[in-house]
Amino acid sequence: MRYARAGDDQSGEVRLAELARLADVLVSDEGAVSYRIRGGMVAGRPVLKLDVETAVTLICQLCLQPY
C-alpha cells in the first residue's frame, strides 16, 4: 500500500527465456516482456496499474502448429 500511496512508478523488461512456465508453448524464447507498474490513489483508495506488452509465437495445443 505504501507503493500506491507514494505514487511510485517502475518499468522494465523480463526476457522470455526467464519465463519457465511459458517454455512449452513458445516457438522461440527470443524477445522480452515489457512492464510498467504505477501506484496511485483513486477515490481515496490505493491502486496499482500494471501494463504488460510482448509479442510471442505460440504452439497451438490442438494442431501443434505455430500461430
Image (cartoon, rainbow, N blue to C red):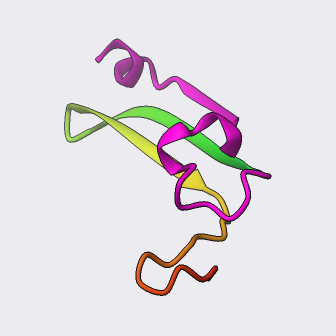
Q: Where 40 sits versus 58, above or below? A: above
Left or right relative to 20: residue 3: left
Residue placed most toward the observer, 47 or 58: 58
Residue placed most toward the observer, 46 or 62: 62
Q: Residue at x 20, y 32 (%)?
A: 44
Residue placed most toward the observer, 15 or 58: 58
Residue placed most toward the observer, 19 or 42: 19
Residue 15 visible in the snapshot = no
15 within the magenta span:
yes
Residue found farthest to the right: 30
Instruction: Indicate the position of residue 62 as horizontal and vertical percent values.
Output: 41, 83
Instruction: Indicate the position of residue 23 as horizontal and vertical percent values.
Output: 57, 49
Q: Residue at x 65, y 59 (%)?
A: 54
Q: Where 53 sits versus 66, above or below? A: above
Instruction: Indicate the position of residue 39 as horizontal and vertical percent values.
Output: 43, 31
In the image, which residues are magenta? 1-30
- Count of numbered circles in the view: 0
Left or right relative to 42: residue 38: right
